[in-house]
Image (cartoon, helix red, strand yellow):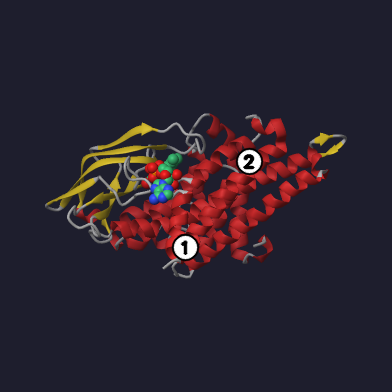
């Protein structure tokens, strides 16, 4: 959809996010990648702008906007800094959304409100060393003892893990019941027994923290059970549908950032006495980039519209994430091609976009998992 088709309120939020991204995030994006440094000031500014809980009602500290607004904001940030985008995406999609959807009033007031205001940061602890694509194979245990659960186990690759204050954690509560064995918990990351394990050294999105989180007999009150006991997998799958819209958007943003850089470069770079943008080979690369990015964005918008209307969108979110992430990989690869040797250098941003794009094909379900989800839906 072209920007001119957006409603006025959406144009306004998009403009606010664009100015923030281009004037402030752009100043630190390369450094936060180079130094693998968490963009603290950028996230603080996101909190001030209301970007940490965009689709959360105002009564719970959010901006009270729709999911579409969230997608518009996220694309602007991702087009400049994919690290900042994933930190914002995890807080919004993977932490605020399940609290908003499955939390009771006390949980919303206590946990959702500071997260949506950006006073606290959230993380989502599903993956484990032996539960990646096979997320149902959870080994983390939550043993009930009186009014508490005792949580023990190790979570892998947790975005925001080193910085987070609050976690949504999935654990087995009933080993005997394969269908209702997993429950979701809200865990204070400063509780005794919570340990930040190995911090990953990553290929891309280097400014976002990512680590193992180890739960050493952590006491969690039964008040912190999110949803019903045994319904944790439902919470996880529902959350990941919304999360995939976020990652699809991140991919669209990364692709757009790389495309815009390549287009501008092509107009300036002179070879054989003229700008390389005058060669048809380069024009076709740029035309294909622009077309696939728009197609990816439209798939994201379709899933988002379904979310905003309260309809199911499992298939649409998987399609959006699959297509957008593969588009991001192709576009960033070709952006390097347009830059030639300079694209391979860290002097220019396309090499960072290329490294950042790859993760969008992996987290919140690999491309193979998205195809499994889509096939499951179309063959029902
Ligand atoms: C930087 C980063 C951040 C992350 N952030 C988070 C986070 O915040 N929270 C969280 O819970 N997790 C997070 N993850 C984990 C991520 O979601 C998993 O890495 C992902 O789901 C894949 O799991 P895996 O790495 O164990 O790969 P595996 O599941 O071992 O997959 C390996 C390969 O086998 C393929 N495969 C597996 N099963 C099948 C099958 N049935 N059919 C066909 N192919 C298959 C996969 O597609 C993949 O190509 C993050 C990961 C990374 C790298």
Circle 1 crowding by C-alpha within 10 Å: few under 14, some 14–19, many from 20: some
The image quadrant of residue 177 is bottom left
Q: Residue at x 41, y 33 (%)?
A: 200
Give the x, y percent position of residue 335. Answer: 67, 41
On the image, the x and y values in percent for residue 358 come to 53, 42
- Residue at numbered disc 2: 333
Q: Residue 176, percent across and down?
A: 17, 55
Q: At x 86% / y 38%, what residue is drawn?
A: 274
Spatial distance from mark 2 to mark 1, Cα to Cα?
Answer: 27 Å
Q: Look at the image and tell me whether residue 118 can be seen.
A: no
Examine the rendering and report whether any part of residue 334 can be seen. yes
Residue farthest along the left direction in this orientation: 146
Q: Nearer the viewer, residue 253 or 336?
A: 336
Q: Residue at x 55, y 59 (%)?
A: 300
Q: Is residue 10 left or right of residue 115?
A: right
Q: Nearer the viewer, residue 104 or 286?
A: 286
Is 91 situated above or below 308?
above
Q: Nearer the viewer, residue 54 or 180?
A: 180
Label 2 SS: helix
Q: Residue furthest right?
A: 273
Among numbered discs 2 and 1, the one appearing first in the sequence: 1
Task: Assign a secondary structure to mark 1.
Answer: helix
- Return the mark for residue 315: 1
């Amino acid at each position: 959809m072209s920007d001119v088709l957006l409603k006025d309120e959406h144009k306004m939020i998009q403009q606010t996010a664009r100015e923030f991204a281009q004037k402030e995030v752009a100043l630190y994006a390369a450094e936060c990648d180079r130094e693998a440094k968490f963009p603290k000031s950028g996230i603080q500014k996101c909190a001030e702008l209301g970007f940490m809980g965009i689709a959360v009602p105002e009564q719970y500290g959010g901006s009270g906007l729709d999911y579409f607004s969230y997608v518009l904001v996220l694309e602007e940030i991702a087009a400049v800094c994919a690290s900042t985008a994933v930190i914002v995406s995890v807080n919004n999609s993977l932490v605020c959304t399940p609290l908003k959807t499955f939390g009771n009033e006390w949980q919303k007031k206590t946990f959702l409100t500071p997260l949506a205001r950006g006073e606290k940061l959230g993380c989502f602890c599903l993956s484990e060393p032996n539960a990646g694509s096979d997320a149902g194979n959870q080994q983390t245990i939550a043993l009930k003892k009186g009014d508490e659960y005792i949580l023990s186990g190790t979570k892998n690759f947790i975005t925001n893990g080193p910085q987070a204050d609050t976690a949504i954690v999935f654990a087995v509560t009933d080993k005997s019941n394969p269908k209702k064995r997993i429950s979701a918990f809200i865990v204070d990351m400063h509780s005794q027994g919570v340990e930040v394990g190995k911090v990953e050294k990553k290929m891309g999105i280097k400014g976002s923290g990512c680590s193992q989180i180890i739960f050493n007999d952590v006491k969690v009150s039964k008040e912190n059970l999110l949803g019903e006991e045994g319904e944790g997998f439902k919470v996880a799958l529902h959350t990941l549908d919304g999360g995939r819209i976020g990652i699809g958007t991140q991919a669209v943003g990364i692709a757009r950032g790389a495309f815009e850089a390549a287009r501008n470069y092509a107009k300036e770079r002179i070879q054989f006495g003229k700008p390389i943008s005058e060669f048809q080979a380069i024009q076709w690369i740029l035309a294909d980039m622009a077309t696939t990015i728009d197609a990816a964005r439209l798939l994201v918008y379709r899933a988002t519209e379904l979310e905003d209307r309260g309809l199911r969108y499992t298939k649409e979110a998987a399609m959006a994430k699959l297509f957008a992430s593969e588009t991001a990989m192709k576009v960033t690869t070709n952006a390097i091609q347009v830059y030639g040797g300079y694209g391979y250098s860290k002097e220019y941003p396309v090499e960072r976009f290329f490294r950042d794009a790859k993760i969008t094909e992996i987290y919140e379900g690999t491309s193979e998992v998205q195809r499994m989800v889509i096939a499951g839906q179309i063959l029902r």
